[in-house]
Amino acid sequence: MKRTFVALLLLTFALGADKKPPQGHGENDAVTVEATILSQDQIRQQFGSAFGGNFTALEIHLTPKGGKPYDVRLDDFILRSQSDGDHSGPMEAAQIVDTGALVINQTYAPRTNAQMPQMLAGTKVEMKDDLGNSNSRTADALEALKKAILAEKTITGPETGVLFFPLSAKEKARSLVLSYASPGGKLRIEFK
């Protein structure tokens, strides 16, 4: 009876434990690259929005080897779906939050006579995103993205940042492959 209870207790803890996010690793003589696929909840917590689930976000850790300066260029990254062949490079911050619409609200003055045309009393212009958030919230998300996205620069030590690819977040992690064209050769990173 005790053994059954202990076994059930261990099984409960194992099932309740947080699932490890899909990760991939690649390296050559020039660099080590570690990539982790962020969940929609992680994206929402970090940026205040999951951006409609329209992106796959990767947290990238780059570690140059040999103590030499290393140029990070975003155009060197390509995320590919093996299930349908869709592929893309990473997006810039403004491209990610630029899914909004300009909303114009006009108010009219009351008519004193039914025969008179309506007179425009005022116009309010506001930028809203797909979720109806106002421009201040969109601006906050834009600032958070600019700080978190992997920066293009020369590095001499480890560097971490996030890359957003316009591939649906519903894509299965096992079908994704990150290609990285490093100075030491092309790396192919699969996720497990």
Image (cartoon, rainbow, N blue to C red):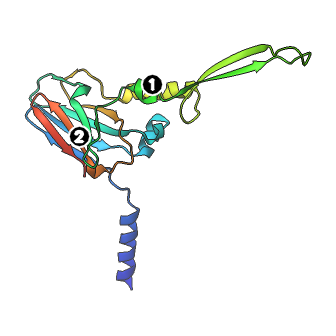
Q: Position of residue 85 (x, y in %)?
A: 26, 43
Point out the frontmost of discs 2 and 1. 2
Find out whether the residues at labels 2 and 1 contact each other: C-beta distance under 8 Å. Answer: no
How far apart in space, not on screen, are marks 2 and 1 (Cα)? 26 Å
Position of 3 with respect to 118 (left or right) is: left
Amino acid type of disc 1? Answer: Glu
Position of 117 with respect to 190 (left or right) is: right
Q: Is residue 158 visible?
A: no
Q: Position of residue 41 (x, y in %)?
A: 45, 45
Position of 39 with respect to 186 (left or right) is: right
Q: Nearer the viewer, residue 107 or 17?
A: 107
Q: Disc 2 on helix, strand or loop?
A: strand
Q: Is residue 36 visible?
A: yes
Residue shown at the point (18%, 24%) measured from the top left: 156
- Residue pointed to by mark 2: 178
Q: Position of residue 159 (x, y in %)?
A: 25, 30
- Residue pointed to by mark 1: 143
Decide: few, some or many residues near mark 1? Use Cα within 10 Å; few <14, some 14-19, many ≥20.
some
Which quadrant holds residue 87? top left
Residue shown at the point (39%, 44%) measured from the top left: 169
